[in-house]
């Protein structure tokens, strides 16, 4: 098992290198010059501009610059933000926990709701429960996260005044009152993401369960007198989870995409919100770092899925 | 096909034998019609498409007629969807926006399907291309798509606008980028089908009579993967519309004078408290369109799956 994980880890390194190259290439190919602000400035003569380029290493060929950029990236040095002039690493460190908290809690909520609904919907196929679950899943998949977000704001903040409009990032939890405030302001961003997760999960689980319910081994389990609940959970569900894990891992990029949107709507101070803002501000170092971090997160979750896959499916050899 | 074989055997009731033979597509259509929600989806999509393409000729209020006197008014007889913060008629804008959204969805999917089918077919057919192409597919699958879309559009927007004009430029950019970042699932699908099709007798037969690789791929094998690709394409249109509206919603899609559905929502989010109708109508349109497309995809999947009948 240890060797399997190690091997998978080693395989993800080239992927990450190529992704870093793609990110770098997009930024390097992009029109525009980092010194364009100086170009319009008559106080900076061309010779001085040339010397600045030299000092910044911009006159070196692109592959040298790429290797240097990559070296810095590996040591965790993302450079400095053009806007706030603080290290990009600090900016991201402040915000990453918020994103991971929202995405993580939403995922847990999604699994807690989606898994039972999917199982129930497959076991009681074509019942009213199944029909409403399938309809709910279809709606969840089809409604864009930003529309659910706006809709929730209209209903719960504007009309009912139950929940705050915008996430207050300065809120510190130190007693019960601030704790409830924190819960209140987190409910909507989390629910928006959780709705999408739940819908996808329900459909996957239902489809996989339906495929396995008529199989012979299920009949055998029933025939030897196992209780129905154990047959469903221990035999059918466990085997159904194997492909579900992969499908869920493949959906992780979409989940982080959804996080960008939710953070934008509710002004949650996460890295998605920072990304959108930095794009607007032309803050290239921050943009590059965040895109790369999203890539790392996606690769990481794929890795976790592969390991889970191996744990769940004994047929996979750890080689 | 099954019907014809049974007629030859002759061991079935006369009534069945008298029924005219049905082609695979007619069979699929017959199945599809029984899927009520998919049929409802077809009707809705047909109506929405017609409305967005013909509607602007019937509902002739201009999309850019600014009138501050009536700004953010809710739905009324003269403005059924209400007006926005600048007093522009929302029905006209929603109709116009649908045109852009649907066009983006379809064009992006055509690009993604072409790319995906080509990569999948090559990887599945030519053994030595399989590994490199599939590694490439895996790599693309682990790219963070939305962030990449955002920076690509942000960085290259101005150049393409200068080249093709403000609307065509951003259209080309969005469509191409969505297409290039979404071909991977189709490539996997086509490759998997090709791997098993390659072993079939009819492919061997075609090769024996001297068909070239290109002919075997295009004429003999591709038609066999058409149905899963069709299902993927249908669902892809919905996903592409969602992606485009997400980009516009984040302020990185079409410019503000092109009212796509996502852009309308972007404009609406600052007026949620005083003008919720600005968000509701465009949002409902996206939702209805994507929901209908997903139901059509579901119906197609059921209809084209030979295991179900």
Image (cartoon, helix red, strand yellow):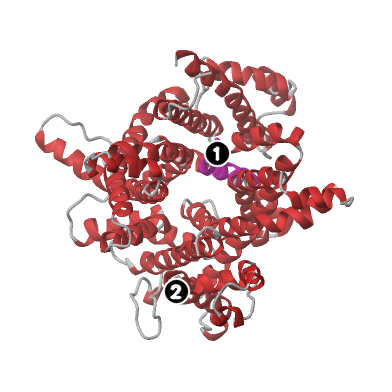
Q: Is residue B155 magenta?
A: yes
Do the dots labelled 1 and 2 sit on one chain? no
Magenta portion: prevailing SS class:
helix
Image quarter of residue B134: top right
- Judging depth in this view, the residue of B81 and A85 nearest the camera is B81
Marking on residue B61? none
- Judging depth in this view, the residue of A32 and A96 nearest the camera is A96
Q: Position of residue B155 (x, y in %)?
A: 62, 43
Q: Position of residue A108 (x, y in %)?
A: 30, 38
A277 w.r.t. A160: above or below: above
Residue in view at x 69 percent, y 60 percent: B165
Label 2's element?
Answer: helix
Q: Does the rendering let one see residue B85?
A: no
Residue in view at x 34 percent, y 82 percent: B76
Q: Which residue is mark 2?
A: B40
Q: Is residue A85 magenta?
A: no
Q: Which residue is mark 1?
A: A282
Labels 1 and 2 touching (C-beta < 8 A): no
Q: Quadrant of the N terminus of chain B?
A: bottom right
B304 w.r.t. A119: above or below: below
Image quarter of residue B275: bottom left
Q: Position of residue B139 (x, y in %)?
A: 60, 34
Residue in view at x 42 percent, y 49 percent: A211
- Judging depth in this view, the residue of A105 and A34 nearest the camera is A105
Label 1's element?
Answer: loop
Q: The residue marked by circle 1 belongs to what chain?
A: A
Q: Which residues are magenta?
A: B141-157
Work out how far the residue at label 1 is from the one at label 2, CA to CA, in angstroms: 46 Å
Residue in view at x 35 percent, y 59 percent: A134
């Amino acid at each position: 098992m240890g060797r399997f994980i190690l091997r998978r880890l080693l395989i993800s390194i080239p992927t990450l290198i190529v992704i870093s190259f793609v990110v770098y290439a997009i930024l390097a190919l992009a029109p525009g010059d980092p010194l364009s602000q100086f170009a319009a400035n008559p106080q900076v003569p061309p010779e001085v501009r040339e010397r600045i380029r030299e000092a910044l290493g911009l006159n070196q060929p692109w592959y040298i610059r790429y290797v240097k950029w990559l070296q810095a990236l590996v040591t965790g040095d993302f450079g400095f933000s053009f806007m706030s002039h603080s290290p990009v690493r600090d900016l991201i460190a402040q915000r990453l926990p918020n994103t991971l908290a929202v995405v993580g809690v939403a995922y847990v909520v999604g699994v807690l709701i989606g898994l039972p609904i999917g199982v129930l919907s497959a076991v009681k196929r074509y019942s009213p429960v199944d029909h409403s679950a399938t309809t709910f899943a279809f709606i969840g998949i089809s409604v864009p996260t930003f529309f659910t977000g706006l809709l929730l704001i209209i209903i719960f903040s504007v009309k009912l005044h139950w929940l705050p409009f915008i996430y207050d990032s300065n809120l510190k939890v130190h007693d019960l009152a601030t704790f409830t405030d924190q819960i209140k302001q987190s409910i909507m961003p989390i629910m928006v993401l959780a709705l999408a997760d739940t819908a996808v999960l329900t459909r996957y689980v239902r489809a996989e369960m339906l495929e396995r319910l008529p199989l012979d081994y299920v009949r055998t389990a029933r025939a030897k007198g196992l209780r129905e609940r154990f047959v469903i959970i221990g035999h059918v569900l466990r085997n159904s989870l194997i492909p579900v894990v992969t499908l869920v891992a493949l959906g992780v990029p979409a989940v982080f995409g959804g996080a960008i949107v939710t953070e934008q709507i509710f002004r949650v101070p996460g890295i998605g919100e920072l990304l959108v803002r930095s794009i607007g501000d032309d803050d290239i170092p921050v943009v590059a770092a965040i895109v790369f971090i999203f890539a790392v997160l996606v690769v990481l979750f794929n890795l976790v899925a592969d390991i889970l896959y191996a744990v769940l499916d004994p047929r996979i050899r750890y080689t | 096909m099954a019907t014809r074989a049974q007629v030859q055997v002759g061991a079935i009731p006369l009534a069945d034998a008298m029924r005219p033979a049905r082609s695979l597509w007619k069979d699929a259509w017959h199945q599809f019609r029984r899927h009520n929600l998919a049929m409802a989806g077809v009707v809705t999509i047909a109506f929405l498409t017609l409305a967005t393409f013909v509607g602007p000729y019937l509902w002739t209020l201009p999309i850019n007629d600014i009138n501050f006197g009536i700004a953010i008014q809710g739905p009324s007889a003269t403005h059924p969807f209400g007006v926005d913060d600048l007093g522009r008629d929302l029905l006209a804008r929603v109709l116009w926006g649908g045109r852009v959204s649907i066009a983006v969805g379809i064009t992006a999917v055509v690009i993604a399907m072409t790319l995906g089918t080509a990569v999948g077919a090559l990887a599945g057919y030519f053994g030595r291309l399989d590994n490199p192409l599939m590694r490439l597919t895996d790599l693309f699958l682990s790219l963070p798509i939305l962030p990449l879309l955002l920076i690509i559009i942000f960085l290259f927007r101005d150049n393409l606008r200068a080249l093709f004009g403000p609307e065509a430029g951003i259209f080309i950019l969005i469509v191409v980028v969505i297409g290039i970042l979404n071909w991977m699932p189709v490539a996997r699908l086509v490759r998997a089908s090709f791997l098993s099709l390659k072993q079939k007798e009819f492919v061997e037969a075609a090769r024996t009579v001297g068909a070239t690789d290109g002919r075997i791929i295009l004429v003999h094998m591709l038609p066999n993967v058409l149905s899963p690709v069709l299902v993927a394409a249908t669902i892809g249109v919905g996903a592409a519309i969602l992606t485009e509206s997400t980009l516009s919603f984040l302020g990185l899609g079409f410019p503000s004078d092109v009212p796509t559905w996502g852009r309308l929502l972007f404009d609406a989010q600052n007026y949620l408290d005083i003008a919720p109708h600005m968000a509701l109508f465009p949002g409902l349109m996206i939702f209805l369109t994507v929901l209908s497309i997903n139901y059509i995809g579901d119906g197609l999947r059921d209809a084209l799956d030979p295991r179900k009948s």
